[in-house]
Amino acid sequence: MQLAPSYAGVSAPVPTHYYVVITNCQDVNQTAEVCDGPLNIFSFLLPHRSDNDESCKSSEDESQWVEELLKLHTARVRDVEILTGLDMYRSTTLNYTQTLSLKTYLHTFESDT
């Protein structure tokens, strides 16, 4: 029996960013998997900073700064793919044009008030 190599003394890799990709159907009665209409997409790339100054604003309630933090770090799905090496929406029934449109869409929050 061969033993796995020991990695004692070697620090584990730490990600430079965390990501979230949210996809939902505009028709709230359908899931994204069976949606026969348009999809909504929101994606975020949150930097992993050693000082946590951006995410730990102890003087403010979370409800005051989390939304602004997410808006600041909005990204395209393609940005997430480039950073992670993943290929999103690969196993969907979307055609090529729909997939490209989702991957390159950047939500701007301009109409969200």
Image (spheres, rainbow, N blue to C red):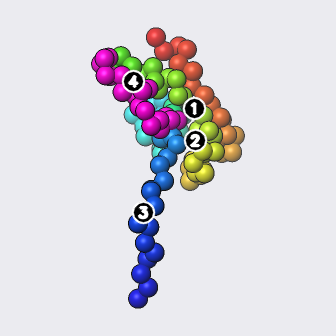
Which residue is more in the foreground, 65 or 39?
A: 65
97 relative position to 64: left or right: right
Residue 108's image quarter? Answer: top right
> What is the spatial separation of the Cα atoms under label 1 and label 3, in whole angstroms?
36 Å
> What is the spatial separation of the Cα atoms under label 2 and label 1, in whole angstroms?
7 Å
The magenta span reads: 45-62
Q: Please state which amino acid type lies under the numbered disc 3.
A: Gly
Above or below residue 35? Residue 58 is above
- The mark that comes first in sequence, 4 or 2, is 4
What secondary structure prevails in the magenta region? loop
- The mark that comes first in sequence, 2 or 1, is 1
The mark found on residue 75 in the picture is 1
Crowdedness near tag 4: few (<14), some (14–19) or many (≥20) residues, C-alpha within 10 Å: some
> What is the spatial separation of the Cα atoms under label 2 and label 3, in whole angstroms?
31 Å
> What is the spatial separation of the Cα atoms under label 3 and label 4, in whole angstroms?
36 Å
Which residue is more in the foreground, 7 or 71?
A: 7
Taking the spot 65% from the left edge, 35% from the top edge, the residue there is 104
Q: Please state which amino acid type lies under the numbered disc 1.
A: Ala
Q: Please state which amino acid type lies under the numbered disc 4.
A: Val
Report whether residue 20 is seen: no
- Provide the residue designation for mark 2: 80
Of discs 1 and 3, which sits in the foreground?
Answer: 3
Taking the spot 53% from the left edge, 13% from the top edge, the residue there is 111
Q: Please state which amino acid type lies under the numbered disc 2.
A: Val
Element type at marker 3? loop
Q: Are marks 2 and 1 in contact (CB under 8 Å)?
A: yes
111 relative position to 53: left or right: right
Crowdedness near tag 2: few (<14), some (14–19) or many (≥20) residues, C-alpha within 10 Å: many
